[in-house]
Image (cartoon, helix red, strand yellow):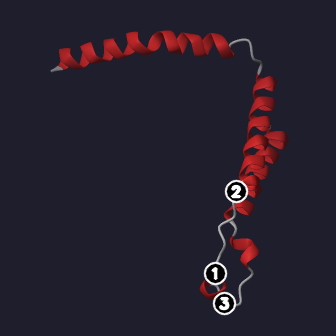
């Protein structure tokens, strides 16, 4: 049983090793400042994408007397992404 697990482990290692080496060689020349900048840009792009998604309309009868603007999940997703960007800029 242990030998079968070791054989499976070695097969998986030989299968994924070229891809892992490719990924390592791809990111090796990137400095930590560049990595943070790339991460911030990706978060900003995701925030822009989230803001373009279709709003699902809330029914007034489901939320009597409530402001439905705050029930839009896009608002909260963008807010969280902006907070993450802020944390990376301030605490890097």
How packed mark 2 is, by other alpha carbons closer than 10 Å (few <14, some 14-19, many 20 or more), is: some
Secondary element under disc 2, as helix, strand or loop, is: helix
- C-alpha gap between disc 2 and disc 1: 21 Å
Q: Which residue is mark 2?
A: 77
Number of the label disc, if any, that sits on residue 64: 3
Q: Earlier in the sequence, mark 1 or mark 3?
A: 1
- C-alpha gap between disc 1 and disc 3: 9 Å
- C-alpha gap between disc 2 and disc 3: 24 Å
Number of the label disc, if any, that sits on residue 59: 1
Quadrant the N terminus occupies? top left
Q: Is residue 16 above or below residue 61?
A: above
**Quadrant position of residue 78:** bottom right
Q: Residue at x 79, y 36 (%)?
A: 41
Asked whether, in this view, residue 9 is left or right of residue 29, the answer is left
Q: Residue at x 75, y 53 (%)?
A: 52
Q: Earlier in the sequence, mark 2 or mark 3?
A: 3
Asked whether, in this view, residue 56 is left or right of residue 14, the answer is right
**Quadrant position of residue 34:** top right
């Amino acid at each position: 049983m242990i030998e079968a697990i070791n054989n499976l482990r070695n097969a998986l290692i030989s299968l994924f090793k070229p891809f892992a080496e490719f990924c390592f060689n791809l990111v090796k020349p990137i400095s930590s400042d560049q990595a943070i900048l790339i991460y911030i840009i990706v978060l900003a792009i995701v925030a822009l994408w989230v803001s373009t998604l279709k709003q699902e309309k809330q029914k007034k009868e489901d939320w009597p007397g409530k402001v439905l603007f705050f029930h839009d999940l896009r608002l909260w997703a963008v807010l969280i992404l902006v907070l993450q960007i802020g944390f990376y800029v301030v605490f890097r």
